[in-house]
Image: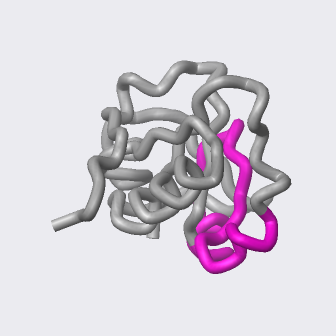
Amino acid sequence: MMPQEVPTTSVDQVPVDAVLLDVREDDEWAAGHAPQAIHIPLGELAERIGEVPQDSGEVYVVCRMGGRSARATMYLNQSGWDAVNVAGGMQVWHQQGLPLVAAEGVVPEVI
């Protein structure tokens, strides 16, 4: 049970022009990520929070399935951002056929 409600949305409700923050690890990011995403691994978020845009409205936070992004969403909201967790994470993103990019020569996948 979480101490507070985490604002959550589904993958298909993420606006095309949204600020999307991917908090997965480097290897997960390299394997495949949303083209417009900003990458800050969850463990680095506290020290790199200044890299998260704060003036563009909501920040949508994604990980592989939704657990790490829920923690990141709570942290951002406590720190003054307007953050929303993306339920199902990159697994659902990929299942729904939304765009994925990876390093050159790599077929994008969600690991």
Foreground residue among 98 and 48: 48
For the point 33% across and 39% down, the residue is 8
Relative horizontal placement of residue 91, taking residue 50 as reference (left or right)? left
**Camera-side residue: 74 or 89?**
74
Residue at the (49%, 52%) spot, across then down: 73
List x then y, in percent, for residue 69: 45, 59
Is 46 above or below relative to 14? below
> Which residue reaches farthest left?
1
Q: Is residue 56 above or below residue 52?
A: above
Q: How is the image coloured?
A: one colour
Question: At x 24% / y 64%, what residue is drawn?
Answer: 2
> Would you say residue 38 sits in the magenta stretch?
yes
- Between 50 and 64, which is closer to the camera in this rendering? 50
Q: Quadrant of residue 70?
A: bottom left
Q: Residue 84 location in percent, x, y?
A: 46, 39
* Residue in the picture at 66% in, 34% down: 19
- The reply, left or right, for residue 6 in relation to residue 1 is right
Report which quarter residue 9 is drawn in.
top left
In the picture, the quarter occupied by the C terminus is bottom left
Q: Quadrant of the N terminus?
A: bottom left
Bounds of the magenta span? 25-48
Residue 75 included in the magenta stretch of the image = no
Image quadrant where residue 41 sits: bottom right
Q: Nearer the viewer, residue 109 or 61?
A: 61
At which x and y percent is residue 29? Answer: 63, 65
Looking at the image, how many numbered discs can be counted on the residues?
A: 0
- Give the left or right position of residue 3, taking residue 80 as reference: left
